[in-house]
Amino acid sequence: MSGNSDAPISGYGGGTTDTVLSVDAVSDEAEALGLSVARETLLKLAGAAPLVQIDGLTAGYGKMEILHQIDLAVGRGQSLCLVGPNGAGKSTILHSIFGFTQIFGGHIKVDGVDVTKQSPSERLRDAGIAYILQDNSVFPDMSVEENLLMGGYLLPDTTLAKEAAERVFERYDRLAQRRTDKAGVLSGGERRLLEISRALIMDPKVLLVDEPSIGLEPRYIDMVFEILGDLKDRDGKTIIMVEQNAKKGLAFADIGYVLVSGRVAMADKGAALLENPDVGRLFLGG
Amino acid sequence: MTDAQKYALVATGLLFSFVAPFLLPQFATQLTMLWLMVIFALTWDTLGGQMGYNSFGNILFFGIGAYGCAVIQRDLGLDYFAGLAVGLAFAAVLSAIVAIVLGAGMLGLRGHYFAIGTLGLGIAAGEIAGGWDYVGAGSGMVPPLYPVELAGRELFFYFLMFALALVTFLVLRALYATKFGLALNAIRDDEDKAEAMGLRTTQVKSLAWAVSAFFLGIGGGLAGNLLGFIDPRDVAFAGATFGVWMVLMAILGGKGTLWGPVIGAVVFHITQELFWTYLLGWQRVALGLLIVAIVVFFPNGILGTLRERFPEWFGEKVEERV
Amino acid sequence: MSALLKIENVSKAYGGVVANRQVSLEVQSGDIAGLIGPNGSGKTTLFSSIVGAHPIDSGSIQFGGQEISKLDVPTIARRGLLRTFQQTRIYAEMNCVENMRISAPDARAPVLSLLSGFSRNVDVRAEELLDFVGLASKRFLRAGSLSFGQQKLLEFAMALMSEPKLLLLDEPTAGVNPTLINGLIDRLIKANKELGITLFVIEHNMRVIMNLAENITCLAHGEVLAQGTPQEVRDDPRVVEAYLGASA
Amino acid sequence: MLENLQLLFDYPTLGADLIANGLMIGAIFALAAFGMALVWGVLGIINIAQGEFVMLGGFVALTAAGLGVPPLATIPLAAIVLFMVGWGLYRLVIFRVVDRDLFVSLLATFGLSIILQQLSNEIFGADVRTLETGLGTLVLFDGQIVLAEIKLVSFVTALVVGLALWAFLKRARLGQAIRATSQNARAARILGIDTDRVYAATYALNAALCGAAGSLVVMAWTIHPYIGLPYTVRSFLVVIVAGLGNIAAVIAAGLGLGALENVAGFVLGAEYQIAFVFALMVIILVVRNFLLRRKREYLK
């Protein structure tokens, strides 16, 4: 029983729990290591002609600056995974590429076009950047089909959206079976499939994927990564993702960046980062 | 700001409060009203600020107090001072009881339902009083007059109202320092969590509203006598003036703080007295503009803004363990 | 060992959807029990039913030998059955010490006995527990200004502060930085072993639950699919089929 | 009060007359409530200035009629003017409170309602006003039900406008964007929907609905600058009874409230009619909350 409140409990103060690193401690250690990455390294990882290229991006929300002088490059048909502690600015990078942040400096280019000043809808329609949101971004009271059609909201003609939706149904039979069901009653995996395929209606070049595995049961996590891998390999989509489950994310990605306090601290091939002992200790929890 | 500076400030304020009606006798009534405003803001904040239940109808208890006191004074046949004393006591108890009874239903409502529900209560009360002959219906009530042969009516009410404001402040200050006070804050921050942790939220909420109503009821009784006339819609249940001011003053000073409502009431009242008369009928338009401006641009109020700027004045700090 | 929590044939539906159907399970006193299952399999609903937030349609829930399925949330909490929330819930505008103080058992007394200050013991205990979860240096900060992981730790400390017999934890590691997870597991085990608090944990992270729990129940479609030790559950073909997938 | 009740029993057709007249204004309540539900669902704001929009619609109609516009033509005119007022208020104030906590938006719209009320008082004066349409009276069932024709026109117009709006939400592109935003604003944004414009359009559309309602009110009944709050409360009442999504329920609840209020006004006396509306709201709120909680089946 717990009534025994006199029992001494030891923690940080007592120093018996040594397997823990707080977020602050991670940042401190990473800074102490003086980690930083040269632009050339990033460009080399991305191959000859990067599809998405970010130079010296400084951005944030309102007046708050979260990203400091970020460089990023990823090639066509490549996947990039961003890892790092909470609050390092991983999602902020995705938001900046899609146009949800305040950009104070730097440039974002997609396929050679500078999109820095474009609105989100321009980026989606003209530059081919689609955002796949983590967790529950379907319209629960609309049918699966209506949800897909909403994905084509920016298309000039609704018949185009209908055609694209048909292609999605041909490709993903699971979704076709639930065509007329309300999206709110889908299972977690089906919902995630709908979220991904809804982004395909606009036939984007770049997929920004925010936490694909969050809140999913184990067997669906594999399914989601399979779908993403298929989109990358078969359709040549470029994927930039943020993943809480860093091991899964790095195992999937061609390139991995480690972010600390709004800067890129390390960058390498995904598999290589996974092997890196510093990364393991500081970011993957041993 | 050091503690010594804070104490000096408070002492100066207190001293001024004692001598003000003698220094500025021509403003005695306005000064008395100032203390009423302080009571308004303080009692509103108990629910709105500390507990997060934004009532738009707390004016209800003010009106009940005003009528309750006046009815006792009218019907009991006591001499003026005894009648007033019994009337005020009755006003306080009646308001508190009504708060507990209404609270059983109303305090189960959350968020905007509570806000709009209480708004409805306040207006319904005004409409009912306006049709009820026992309290003079639409033509209102006139409480007994302060004995003409005695001088010092204004000072009498000034010091009564001042004392009430002071006692209200001290009682609330003491309450907020107890477990009860912390329970109020817990309900404000997350009522479901508080329930899940086993707090007796229903009891806590009822008591809070009763305390608020208790002091507001006395305030109503005093104000009726001070003003010398109780109108159902423009005095007792004056939702469009007093009722809104309560909320506004508390927000202006800083919701959920002890001193915020006091500061907000003083600033608002002085502003109002200085500028109101020059607005020639446009006062209420200005009031609306003021509400919008404050909630949109200044929702944390004076103290809330100071707290953001100087968190250490309010005891926020990171302490590294040695 | 005796069953501290005994759930028998519990069913619960809302809006025509069956969330739990004939669920039966036991949590032994002193144990760490796990609850796993796909999304929408009724885990969180079962937790809500146990603590009284979603009353059950039929069946029985006994805690310490007494029927609690008809009691309300605060009453059940006062008997020593507490939960933490998936979306961490703390009192955001209060500082950490205040969060701890109001979680102490004596804050649950009838309202008139709340009209007094805090005892020294409460404050000592609050400091100890904040130290235990590593938040001692932040104890005078607004809880809302802590990071998500720190808020989870605070919520856990608050639960310990209120001295429960049984603590239900809803995904304690979801959204927690990987580097903090080991420490969290460590503290959960300590709370169980040193403070004697029985734990019942919903968790998606297989690594965590397999290391933590002594007994695991797997739900699917609101029904109990499998029960047993971590190894048994992990090897159960039905669990693999419905939940873990081939590669788990 | 009891005498009035007795009257109702002695002359049951009197009840039919009261109910028929009540249903007419009930359609107006439904219209305003539909707008409130829209704003509530999409922006997450309870618009306390709802009734003031109705009142303004009435004054727009009055002013236009004074300038020679035929009475019935003031209905679309009031809607258009109020649409612009709504858009303007969104751009000035509402967009600043959309994502803030409910209390802030509640108080901000409360402030707006006071401003509109007092401005109208200064500009149009505090008198009770009505707009003569020149339409006659309908006498039904041998004079047992007497109904002004304009009330019937108002009833039909209100229902037609409501249904047109419902079709707009289902079919039109902007309507779909509004529905999508109300179900999941974040998701709408990542699909390129400009939610800020959707919010502005929704708020303006609501104001337009109220404006049309107001022009009907001034023709069939009366208005004055302080008429707003009761309309706000009636809209709120209808919405909490009917829910946010169901148009049939909104119409039914609106009509029901109109009839109930008219009968209650007769029985209790006209001076208590407003008190009745407010008290009814409080009672419904409390009972509804009690029923919701009852589902938890407390033992003790």
Image (spheres, helix red, strand yellow):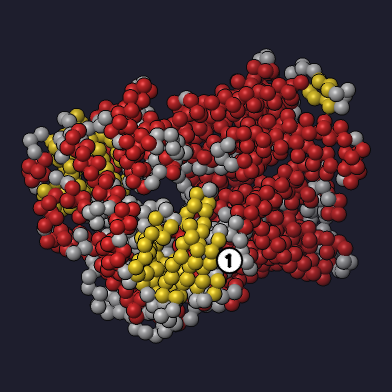
Residue depicted at x 36% and y 57%: C37
Residue depicted at x 42% and y 84%: A4
In this view, A152 is above or below B155: above
Label 1 is found on which chain of the structure?
C
Residue indicated by mark 1? C70
Residue depicted at x 72% and y 43%: D277
In this view, B151 is above or below D229: below
Q: Secondary structure at mark 1?
A: loop
Residue B4: x %, y % from top left: 45, 72
Residue C51: x %, y % from top left: 50, 65
Disc 1 marks a residue whose amino acid type is: Lys
Residue depicted at x 66% and y 28%: D214
Residue A253 seen in the current view: yes
Residue C148 seen in the current view: no
In this view, D286 is above or below C79: above
Which residue is more in the foreground, B161 or C174? Answer: C174
The C terminus of chain D sits in image quarter: bottom right
Q: Is residue C91 left or right of residue B93?
A: left
